[in-house]
Amino acid sequence: MTARRVLFRLLWPLVFALPLWVMFGRAFFGVPLGLQFVGQVFLVPLLFVGQVVAAGLVVARRSVRTGRAVSWLDAGLLGTAWVAQLALGFFLVDSSAGSRAASAFTAVAGGGLDLSTALFALSAVVTIASVIGLVASGVWQLLRETGERVAASMADLDRVAGLGVAQAGAAGNRPSATSGMRGPARGDGPVIRIEPRGEGDARRSDA
């Protein structure tokens, strides 16, 4: 969990920093920028846009924002993409293996042009594939989480509706306060009153 939270915090800073490293990495080691820089001016913005889209899809998920941690799938793809881009700053192809203008890898390891070219190609392929994988997995995870949230909301609505119907049925079957009284209520019909015989004779004599 800690590693995924660290990757979440590094997500946006590295989205901006790594494309700049790919473009200017060798310049930090004193290598002059030549024709390769012209190609990078057109290619690196595409890399930047792809990472912005991928990062936006990751952050769009509520689970990521709430937990402030990426998923394990995000972590694997992000780590691969970031390491590959770091490598591009070292393995960019040199114009001449024996010249003083050499990449950091050539200067340290003393490798030839063919080795630098192969490592550059490998790093570029891994970078492109991992960024595409980030976008695809971001769309899939976002749709899956949204679908689960909608299904949970519908289940809650169905449960609330079922409880309302059950309560209404129980209220309809409940006996009223006067249903247990015996005899007709006043005003519902004629009432026959039976009086004792003596009391009735006394009333007639008084009349």
Image (cartoon, helix red, strand yellow):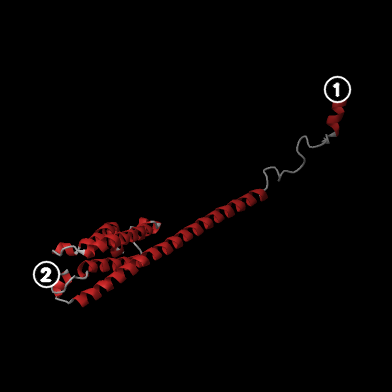
Task: Name the image quarter holding the N terminus.
Answer: bottom left
Query: In terms of image quadrants, where is residue 98?
Result: bottom left
The mark tally for this picture is 2
Q: Tell whether 138 sits left or right of 78.
A: right
At numbered mark 1, what does the secondary structure look like: helix, strand or loop? Answer: helix
**How many other residues sit within 10 Å of disc 2, few (<14), some (14-19) or many (≥20)?**
few
| Residue 180 at x, y percent in the picture | 71, 46
- Of the numbered discs 1 and 2, the one sitting upstream in the chain is 2
**Residue at the extreme front:** 35
Q: Residue 134, position in %: x, y?
A: 36, 65
Tell me residue 93's x, y (percent): 21, 70
Between 34 and 143, the one nearer to me in the picture: 34
At numbered mark 2, what does the secondary structure look like: helix, strand or loop? Answer: loop
Residue 159 disc label: none
Question: Which of the 4 quarters of the picture holds residue 118?
Answer: bottom left
Which residue type does callout 2 highlight?
A: Arg
Quadrant assignment, res 124: bottom left
Q: Which residue is mark 1?
A: 206
Residue 131 located left or right of residue 176: left
Q: Quadrant of the C terminus?
A: top right
Question: Which residue is tagged 2?
Answer: 100
